[in-house]
Image (cartoon, rainbow, N blue to C red):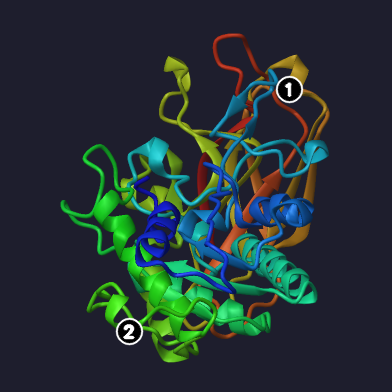
Amino acid sequence: SDRFCDQIEQFYGRAGVTVGGKAIELYAVGIDSWTTTQEVAYLSSRISAYDPDVILVMTTANDITDISGVTGAGTVTHAFSPEHRANGSGVFVDFAGHQFGAMGPSMIFSDLVPEARKRWSKAMLALKSLTELQHRRGKMILHSVLVIYGDYFSEMYKYHFHEARIEAPFIVTRYFKNETTKLPHDGHPNRLGHSIFRSHFVHALDRLGWVPVPENALPDLHEGLSLEFSPAPDLTELRRHRREFADEILKTSLDFRRLTRVEARALLGGIYPNRDRRDKALPWASVRSGFALKRLPAATPESIEVMIRIPPLIELFPFHLDVYVNGELTKQYDFPEPRESAIYKLVAQVPPMAEDDLAVEVVFRTKSYYTGIVDARMKSFSLVSAQVR
């Protein structure tokens, strides 16, 4: 009963608001940990059963990326995601650095690297398909973007929403997270926080003429919220946010043996602290792992140099590793058998970059991993260092 959808239904019922003489019902169909793509797939496949006159979509920062998946032992975990079963299951998430004590969103949260931009494109394509499906039914849809971590995400949303040419209104909403509007045990909104959403949606639906409410019955709208529909992106502001985010996190080199909390936010995912005492200082990579480095100033970098350690375990060999730089496969390595020195030097060329690119993305893919009963995660190799040259 605390959720904004329940509060909207309660408000309409108490205020006697109907449409065409019919009472208004709301259904909450969001599922914990689902992405925008999963939400759209679910609702699209059941849209005839729900038969909604209006769809309300709320998108927030961790809706763009993957959340949960499977381990090497087949169990469900938040540490992995089955992007494609054949390619392994290293997950790229907004909070990839949390296991290193790095609070705050990681590089995949942004749209600075190809892996992140792929997710934005996929999410917006999903929202566009849902919008078009609802319109073909002769019905309506209202999108919203929820601001939590500041305005960077909302500016990215505005930009990608407009670039996708989604023909539907959206609003920018927030619950002004503080001790009075959030739950006592985490940062999600409490009843008061949800009531801020309720009032915003009620006002928006009234302004659009979809669910008119007598003016004297409208709830108070929070003074920090606007009824501007589909605000255009501020490209100057977006560029500023991108640069500030990159400057805060990115370095031209990473020493994974001494990874600071801020540097850990440069991780895209698939990189985890090592529990083995012998290699505790070296984080290990899964079958799909990635991170970002800072672009060299006033020059296009020529190459990426990465040092890795491949454990001399027979189940890992022959070991094949694909190296992707800025989304392009630039190098493939094959190691037929373990060698005396387990440290390997990898060098990959950087493809041509746009003038305003701020980050260089490095992603590794392999099918070699080892796992165990105690720790069923897909361990592959350890990262030692990386630098852009």
For the N terminus, the image quarter is top left
Tell me the residue at 78%/72% (across/down): 137
Of 345 and 174, nearer the camera is: 174
Amino acid type assigned to the residue bearing label 1 in the image = Pro
Q: Is residue 87 above or below residue 153?
A: above
Residue under label 2, please give it: 215
Q: Is residue 386 left or right of residue 321?
A: left
Of 285 and 82, nearer the camera is: 82
Q: Residue furthest top?
A: 373
Q: Nearer the viewer, mark 2 or mark 1?
A: 2
Circle on res. 233: none
Tell me the residue at 74%/36% (across/down): 88
Q: Quadrant of residue 240?
A: bottom left
Residue under label 1, please give it: 338
Q: Residue furthest left?
A: 179
Amino acid type assigned to the residue bearing label 2 in the image = Glu
What is the secondary structure assignment of the residue under circle 1? loop
